[in-house]
Amino acid sequence: MALHIIIDGYNMIYRSKRIGDAGHAHLQESRDRLIQSLHAYKKLKHHRITVVFDGTNAPSPTPWRDQAGGIEIRFSRRGESADTVIKRMANQEKEKALVVSSDRDIVAFAANHGAAVVSADEFENKISQALLMNPKDPDGEHMDEPTGWTPTTKKKGPARRLSKKDRKMRLKLEKI
């Protein structure tokens, strides 16, 4: 099952210390930084990623749909919020979707319709971890190849079995 990551763009920007530090003055710069970060993440994980922004803050000659570096970018139409677009996408994708937002309304809606949900802060941490664990530089050349034994903290033994819903959610979160 392919995972479709649906991101509440401005929520992610405003919650991020790294991406959104430019503030309202340089919103386009923050959007570009988010897209670059997601592009680097997509190179590692190969998930389908869609970022949804409110169309009211869009640059003036912007199409409603665009693509940059394999990341689908959507702006909501006039009179429609990004929240509505995200909810519609989560309802269509159901179990295939992972919604990234810290907005309680979106989180509750997505979870009730079968989509996995992760907060913007947690997803930013996942992106950072994935990029730090990558042994390649941005040009695709190997930097330092790990040699020998790699320490691990995986435990073996009996554990309490989670519910089926929680196991599905956990599988989706392990993929990111």
Image: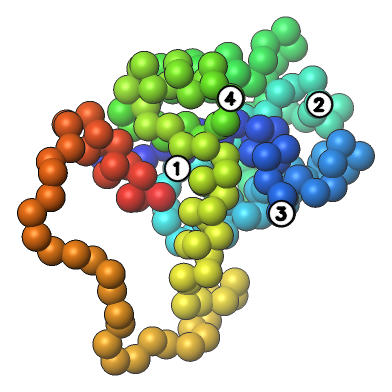
Q: Nearer the viewer, mark 4 or mark 1?
A: 4
> Mark 4 packing: few (<14 Cα in 10 Å), some, or many (20+)?
some
Q: CA distance from mark 1 to mark 2?
A: 24 Å
| Image coords of residue 91 (percent x, y) | 41, 17
Tell me how far mark 2 sits from mark 3, CA to CA. 20 Å
Mark 4 vs mark 2, CA separation in Å = 18 Å
Picture residue at 50% right of the left edge, 41% below the top: 49
Q: Earlier in the sequence, mark 2 or mark 3?
A: 3
Which residue is labeled 3 in the image?
Answer: 18
Q: Earlier in the sequence, mark 3 or mark 1?
A: 3
Under mark 4, the amino acid is Asp
Q: Amino acid at mark 3?
A: Arg
Q: Which mark is residue 57?
A: 2
Residue 153 x, y percent position in the rendering: 28, 69
Name of the residue lying farthest toward the top: 79
* Horizontal side, residue 5 vs residue 82: left or right: left
